[in-house]
Amino acid sequence: MNNTVFISYAQKDSEAAKSLVRKLSSRGVDAWDDCKLLPGESWEQHVKDALVSSRAVVLLLGEGDPSPSVLVEAGMAMGQGKRIVPVIVAENANLSLFPNLQRLRAVNEKEINAAADQIATFVSN
């Protein structure tokens, strides 16, 4: 069974992404992020492949507007009908660019352990 979760984040939120990857990995979930890319590799095809093969997509939403890559990855995930889990890592994250996601229950970074548990449960079933 596929238990891969795609982590989408802006570089400014890389510490939160690394923390979530560790928490998910400790729960047996394969969390894909761009740290798995080797120097010189083309990220575009790897991102597409990882999104297609993932069971869910976690959007880390940090301070201000999301990065262009997060917007593109969110659009790709929605187009593929992936389950999306928004994780708010800053109080002033701008969700207005995600009208379709505003109806989803977002997780605050303070609840990250609970979110990791819930994500692990979902991808394991």
Image: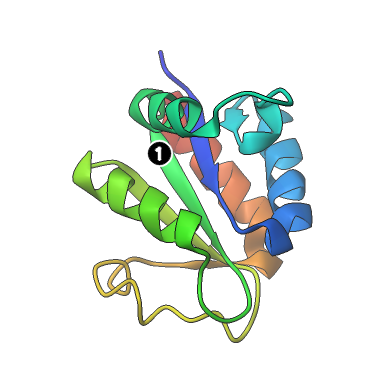
- Residue at position x 47%, y 62% from top? 68
Q: Quadrant of residue 63?
A: bottom right
Q: Nearer the viewer, residue 17 or 110?
A: 17
Q: Residue 44: give x, y in percent of width and height.
A: 46, 34
The correct choice, above or below, for 103 with respect to 15 in the image is below
Q: Nearer the viewer, residue 90 or 73?
A: 73
- Residue at position x 54%, y 32% from top? 43
- Residue at position x 44%, y 26% from top? 45
Q: Residue 21: give x, y in percent of width and height.
A: 69, 39
- Residue at position x 30%, y 53% from top? 75
Considering the image in quadrants, where does the C terminus appear? Answer: top left
Q: Residue 84: give x, y in percent of width and height.
A: 37, 51
Secondary element at tag 1: strand
Q: Give the colour scheme of this rendering.
A: rainbow
| Drawn side of residue 36 relative to residue 79, left or right | right
The correct choice, above or below, for 52 with respect to 6 in the image is above
Looking at the rendered structure, the kind of residue marked 1 is Ala
Total numbered circles: 1
Residue under circle 1?
56
Considering the image in quadrants, where does the N terminus appear? Answer: top left
The correct choice, above or below, for 56 with respect to 94 in the image is above
Q: Nearer the viewer, residue 110 or 59?
A: 59
